[in-house]
Structures are given as C-alpha cells and as structure tokens.
C-alpha cells in the first residue's frame, strides 16, 4: 500500500531532469525492504538511483532491458 504513495515522489524526481524524454522509467519496480523511498527494478534488482532512468544501466541480462531492446 505504501507503493503508490512513494512512487509519486520518485516520478517527480525524474520529471525535473533536463532530458526527460531519454529516461526510461517504465520498468516494473518494487520497494526495497527497510529503505524508505528506495525502489529497485523487479527484474535485475538494481535500485532506481543506480539505474538513474537509463536503460543501459540495467544489468545486461535484465528481463526488462532485453525486452526494450528487442
Ligand atoms: Zn532492470
């Protein structure tokens, strides 16, 4: 239930970026247990601040990344 509340905040962060259209934030995310406002890709488990909205920052074998590249 905390998911909806927190994801609104992180979307706001991405919208402030100067190159929003290059950002890829449609990937499935899940909250990181024990860490407030921290989310990670459901496929490769990298946290959103590491991915930083870039498809190439997902792990090479990330299911989502492979899907987007196909
Ligand atoms: Zn990923």
Image (cartoon, rainbow, N blue to C red):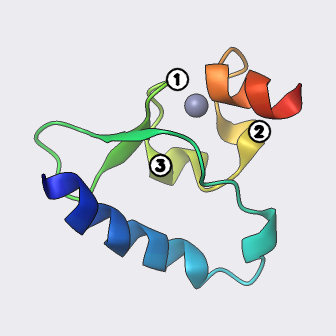
Q: Is residue 34 above or below residue 15?
A: above
User: Mark 3 highlights which residue?
Assistant: 48
How far apart, in angstroms, are the residues tagged by discs 3 and 2?
13 Å
Secondary structure at badge 2 equals: helix
Secondary structure at badge 1 equals: loop
The residue most toward the right is 70
Where residue 14 appears, x then y in whole percent? 56, 72
Please state if 10 lies on the left or on the right of 31 as rendered: right
Circle 1 Cα neighbour tier, 10 Å, few/some/many (<14 / 14–19 / ≥20): some
Please state if 55 lies on the left or on the right of 14 as rendered: right
Quadrant of ligand 1: it is top right
Dot 1 or dot 2, earlier in sequence: 1
How far apart, in angstroms, are the residues tagged by discs 1 and 2?
12 Å
How far apart, in angstroms, are the residues tagged by discs 1 and 3?
11 Å
Secondary structure at badge 3 equals: helix
Q: Respond yes or no on whether mark 1 lies under 8 Å from ligand 1.
A: yes
Residue occupying image coordinates x 34% and y 73%? 9
Mark linked to residue 56: 2
Residue occupying image coordinates x 52% and y 23%? 44
- The image quadrant of residue 40 is top left
In which quadrant of the rendered image does the C terminus lie?
A: top right
- Mark 3 and mark 2 in contact? Answer it, CB < 8 Å: no
User: Mark 1 highlights which residue?
Assistant: 44
Report the number of discs: 3
Circle 3 Cα neighbour tier, 10 Å, few/some/many (<14 / 14–19 / ≥20): many
Residue occupying image coordinates x 68% and y 39%? 57
Where residue 12 appears, x then y in whole percent? 45, 79
Please state if 35 lies on the left or on the right of 61 as rendered: left
- The image quadrant of residue 18 is bottom right
Residue occupying image coordinates x 48% and y 33%? 46
């Amino acid at each position: 239930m905390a998911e909806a509340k927190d994801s609104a905040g992180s979307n706001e962060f991405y919208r402030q970026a100067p190159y929003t259209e290059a950002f890829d934030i449609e990937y499935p995310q899940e909250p990181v247990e024990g860490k407030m406002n921290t989310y990670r890709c459901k496929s490769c488990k990298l946290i959103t601040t590491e991915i930083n909205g870039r498809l190439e920052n997902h792990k090479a074998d990330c299911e989502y990344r492979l899907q987007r590249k196909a």
